[in-house]
Image (cartoon, rainbow, N blue to C red):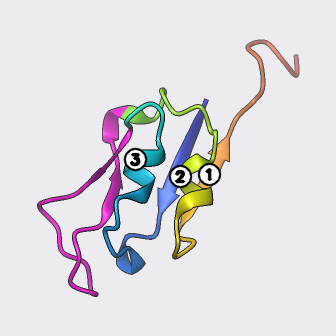
Amino acid sequence: MGRILIQEDGCKGCSYCVEACPRGLIKIDPERINNLGYNPALFAEHAAGQCSGCALCAEICPEVLIEVYADNRKAGAGK
C-alpha cells in the first residue's frame, strides 16, 4: 500500500508521471490551473488503497515534485 503527494503548484503538466504509473492512478487535472498557468497532475481520490508505492512517478518527475509514501507492513505486523 502506498500513496503519493504531488506539489501541484510547481507542476508543469508534462504528464510523465501519468505515463509512468503502472496502475493509472495519476491524471492531469483539467479543472485546475496552478500558479504557473498549467493544469497540474493529480493523484486520484479513489487511488489511496491501490498505489503500490513503486515510486516510478517520483523518479520520472523532472521537477522533483512527487513524494512517495509506502507502507510495506504486513497485516498483523507489530502485534
Please tell me whether mark 1 sits on a helix, a strand or a loop.
strand
Q: Amino acid at mark 1?
A: Val
Look at the picture and state if 45 lies above or below 1: below
The mark that comes first in sequence, 2 or 3, is 3
Q: Are marks 1 and 2 in contact (CB under 8 Å)?
A: yes
Residue receiving disc 2: 57
Q: Residue placed at 75% from the left, 30% from the top?
A: 72
The mark that comes first in sequence, 1 or 2, is 2
Residue 35, numbered circle: none
Q: Residue placed at 47% from the left, 41% from the top?
A: 21
Cα distance, mark 1 to mark 2? 9 Å
- Of residues 64 and 50, the one nearer the viewer is 64
- Of residues 69 and 13, the one nearer the viewer is 13
Residue found farthest to the left: 31
Check disc 1: other Cα within 10 Å, few if <14, some if 14-19, many if 20+.
Answer: some
Residue receiving disc 1: 68
41 sits to left or right of 66: left
